[in-house]
Image: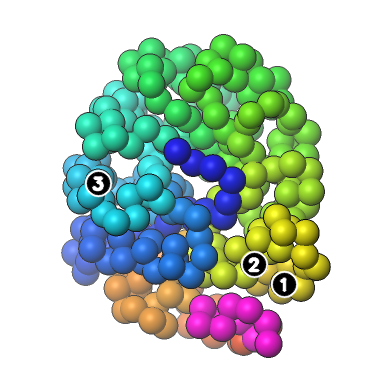
Amino acid sequence: MIKKGIYAAGLSVLNDDYSLNVEATVAHAESSIKHGLHGVFFFGSTGQSQLISVSEKKDLISRIASHKLRKNFFLGTGNNSLKETIDLIKYGFEYDFKDYLIMPPAYYKGNTDEGVFDFYKTIISRVPKIKIILYNFEKLSGYKFSTESVTKLVNSFPNNIIGCKDSSYNLFENLKLPNFLMFPGSEAKLLKGLKLGCSGCISAVTNVTHSLARKVFDDFEEKKPQTQNDKLIAVRETFDQYNLISALHCYMSKQENRFNNLLPPLILLNSNEKKDLINKLNNLNFTIEKNLAA
């Protein structure tokens, strides 16, 4: 079960034919955990979840079920289809995956609180033992959770709605619910969120800032001086200047060529953008191998 901590929305590694490379995707997650993450969510938006087939998602689920880091692996659904979402969750339950990061369907805009409530209500009615992390990301879904809409869901389904990833940043400062996990979607909000009682963060960029983010988290928990937060924010703000998926894959491709593969219509940064990104990170004395400041 998910707890307080630092998590990544894991990257998906693709073969040259755009099929999901399960071994490399899991290996990247394993490496990220080794470098400090408490866990990784497969098939979040950073993992190209809307573009990856349900059959490939099921393949990964079945193959990580017996992994030594099984308790550190979590799942997103990344489907607009309600039926496919429920089908994928039921499949995950066969392998004892019970915690899910679920965004409202992201195609039709103008979704109402009532409609989104019914979406989660239907999932819970079909899978009554599910634990759900709500995914608040208006930029992609076209819907922004309010404190009132989240509170209604939690009050209606207190055994199922256990937390929220807030990538719209309108909730983590304002929503106060007992025994509710709140994860800002950016390391730049991590320390501020922790001071407000948040649970950590679930972020795209922790695929590379894992050690830095974990240091900030641990120092807060242990009431030590913060020596790395400024650098963590600077690195995150650098990545935020570009499309995050494109920038992360470009950066990771320095280590592994297969990160060069993205499912269309996603593309990598152009050569000038990539050079600019690398130069800015070098100026911050940041590499994956050298996460922490000297």
Q: Is residue 137 magenta?
A: no
Q: x and y percent of residue 197 in the render?
A: 74, 41
Picture quarter with the C terminus:
bottom right
Q: Nearer the viewer, mark 2 or mark 1?
A: 2
Please give the range of residues in magenta. Answer: 285-294
Q: For the view shown, which residue lies furthest in the front direction?
A: 222
The residue tagged 1 is 228
CB contact under 8 Å: marks 2 and 1: yes
In space, the residues marked 3 and 1 are separated at their CA atoms by 35 Å
Q: Residue at x 38, y 61 (%)?
A: 29
Of the image marks 2 and 1, the number of the one nearer the N terminus: 2
The residue tagged 2 is 215
Secondary structure beneath disc 1?
A: loop
Q: Amino acid at mark 3?
A: Ala
168 vs 12: above or below: above
Q: Amino acid at mark 2?
A: Lys
The residue tagged 3 is 65
